[in-house]
Image (tube, rainbow, N blue to C red):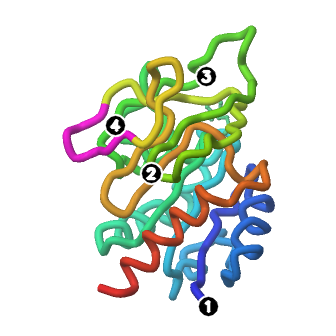
Amino acid sequence: AKKIGVLALQGAFREHRQALKSLGCEVTEVRKSSDLEDINGLVIPGGESTTMGKLLQVDKLGEKIKELAAKNLPIFGTCAGMIVLSKRIEDSNQYSLGLMDVTVQRNAFGRQVASFETNLEIPALGKDPIRAIFIRAPYIKEVAPNVGILAEYEGKIVFARQGNMIASAFHPELTEDRRVHQYFLSIVDEQLAK
Ligand code: GLN
């Protein structure tokens, strides 16, 4: 079985673990550098990106993740995980891995609609829209030319891919539709076949 690490410093890691297990993966919770050994992919969950960033600097865990990313480890970030993956964070100097060449805006959907659900068209995942849950979600304001846009909501980029990395502003681990996780695992499979 594929071995997928789920960053388990804080946030919604249990739901990702369940989603990946239901798809037949072996799942390791990542809390220290040695937990990253032998994984075939890494999920960075939602939660609170400032806190996650602080914890990533302990024991050089973030640096180790960057080394693995440079060797094409597939990485999937959701919500706070999207923020942690990004190179630029609007109005913030918090720590991030700086792996995806995008600018994100945190808490981007305003106070009234801070959290909401919608049917999201994601052409790469087929004709049926995905039920997408947004919780104080970020969105991507700008992408470099090497970043592909997978989905937009009201003109805002909410799902993107750069090489073996994907990032979603919404939480696919909170619904039963497993197509987003399957898409990530197809990237893992492609990388393993190389
Ligand atoms: N608003 C959070 C942040 O900026 C992200 C919210 C989430 O992951 N659900 O870190």
Tell me the magenta residue range.
Answer: 143-149
Label 4 is placed on what type of residue? Val
Which tag is nearer the camera, tag 4 or tag 2?
2
Q: Is residue 97 left or right of residue 78?
A: left
Label for residue 107? Answer: 3
Label for residue 124? Answer: 2
Q: Is residue 120 above or below residue 171?
A: above
Give the residue pinned by disc 4. 102
Looking at the rendered image, the quarter that the N terminus falls into is bottom right
Label 1 is placed on what type of residue? Ala
Mark 1 or mark 3: whose residue is earlier in sequence: 1
Label for residue 1? Answer: 1
Mark 3 or mark 2: whose residue is earlier in sequence: 3
- State which image quarter holds ligand 1: top right
Mark 4 or mark 2: whose residue is earlier in sequence: 4
Q: CA distance from mark 3 to mark 2?
A: 26 Å
Front residue (pair 109, 150):
150
> At which x and y percent is residue 171?
68, 44
Looking at the rendered image, the quarter that the C terminus falls into is bottom left
Which tag is nearer the camera, tag 3 or tag 2?
2
> At which x and y percent is residue 117?
74, 29
Q: Is residue 141 above or below residue 190?
A: above
Q: CA distance from mark 3 to mark 4?
A: 16 Å
Q: Are marks 1 and 3 in contact (CB under 8 Å)?
A: no
Asked which quadrant contains residue 144, the reply is: top left
